[in-house]
Image: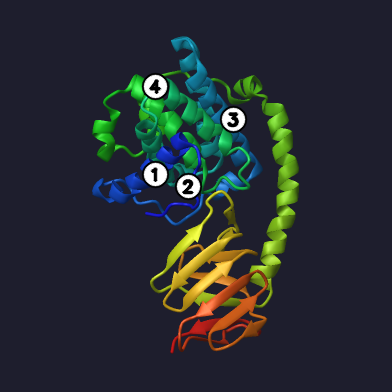
Amino acid sequence: MQLGWPLPADRAARAILMMHELFHRIEGQLPLPAPTQIDNVQLDTADGRYYLQLEWRALASALRATTDDGRRAANAGALAFRAARRAAFPGSAATEDALELHEGLAEYTGVVVGRPEPAARIEAALQDLAAHVGDPSFVRSFAYATGPSYGLLLDRYAPAWRAQIVHTRSLAGTLAAAVPVVLPEVEQAAGTYDGPALRAAEQARAAQHAALLAQYRRALVDGPVATLRFRHMKIEFDPRTVTPLGELGSVYPVLRVVDDWGALAVTGGALLKADWSAVVVPAPSTTSQRTATGDGWRLELAPGWRFEPDDRAGDVRLAPP
């Protein structure tokens, strides 16, 4: 279990965070699907982000609804936007559902245990939905927003759902089964949630994001690099900033890794391979027996570890004593 430091000054936020992390401490006792080490790359595309944010807006409307008809209509909209996203990106349902059961369920637990009053729980879930809109990337953070919303809606429409959690494979799927609805036409429903403006904003962001991806590719793929293979890795990162780089893996702008070879601190971006077998940084500019530095990173080397030439000219890799 890890906690970001310093802890939130707000007592309620602090309680939610601590209960979230305490859930992670015991979740191994539940036979839930293990989250894959594959980031949800569809959520870094214009369409993926568009449908996800519409889903968030519909979930917020469902939580705020004062009538059951209004709540069911908003719930149908959320499910429609999710279905449209998954139809556009085959295979995404499995990776999204797995991360929701890992981080989304933990955040729901934090909200329910940390905020015992029903109105306060809704307020906390709405805060989660709003807080992640500004995340640079949604690929690892989206479940923190959706988990509490789907959990609270399940508490209303399927009160016994938690007793069946070991059999649950999808929070949204469980809600859809509990509240049968006719899904609205997607683009018509999008108009309810300011879809045209959101679409334009995401298209503008996509153009800027393409330049960032090209920059990362030049530094971490095309140029000379250093590869540090994992042995007994421990890692710290901000899930709000992860940027997928296709089948190569994902870029973590800020990262700390501790392994047999030492401690790596990254402030300028590092590429974690898709199978999480290694981390890649730009080739070092300075090296010594105990330290190495490069563009946006510093490595404290364990005794005896050293860099040696890798297969491609200009590349290096860490070698053991």
Q: Please report whichever mark, 3 or 4, sits nearer to the chain's N-terminal start.
A: 3
Say the numbered circle drawn on residue 88.
Answer: none
Q: Earlier in the sequence, mark 1 or mark 4?
A: 1
Q: Judge left or right: residue 28 versus residue 256.
A: left
Residue neighbourhood size for the residue with mark 2, other residues' Cα within 10 Å, grouped as few (<14), some (14–19), many (≥20): few
Residue of label 2: 7
Q: Position of residue 166 (x, y in %)?
A: 26, 40
For the residues marked 2 and 3, what is the alpha-carbon distance in whole angstroms?
31 Å
Instruction: Judge depth for marks 3 and 4 and give the one in front.
Output: 4
State how far apart marks 2 and 4 are (Cα). Answer: 24 Å
Discs 2, 4 touching: Cβ within 8 Å: no
Residue ID for mark 3? 54
Residue nearer the viewer, 180 or 260: 260
Alpha-carbon span between mark 2 and mark 1:
9 Å
Percent position of residue 192, x then y:
63, 19
Q: Nearer the viewer, residue 305 or 62?
A: 305
Per the image, label 2 sits on a secondary structure element best described as loop
Q: Is residue 50 above or below residue 25?
A: above
Q: Residue at x 46, y 43 (%)?
A: 96
The residue where tag 4 is placed is 118
Report if the CB atoms under discs 2 and 1 are less than 8 Å apart: yes
Amino acid bearing label 3: Leu
Residue 227 occupies quadrant: bottom right
Q: Quadrant of residue 164?
A: top left
Residue type of the residue flagged with mark 2: Leu
In this rendering, the count of numbered labels is 4
Q: Position of residue 157 (x, y in %)?
A: 35, 20
Q: Amino acid at mark 4?
A: Pro
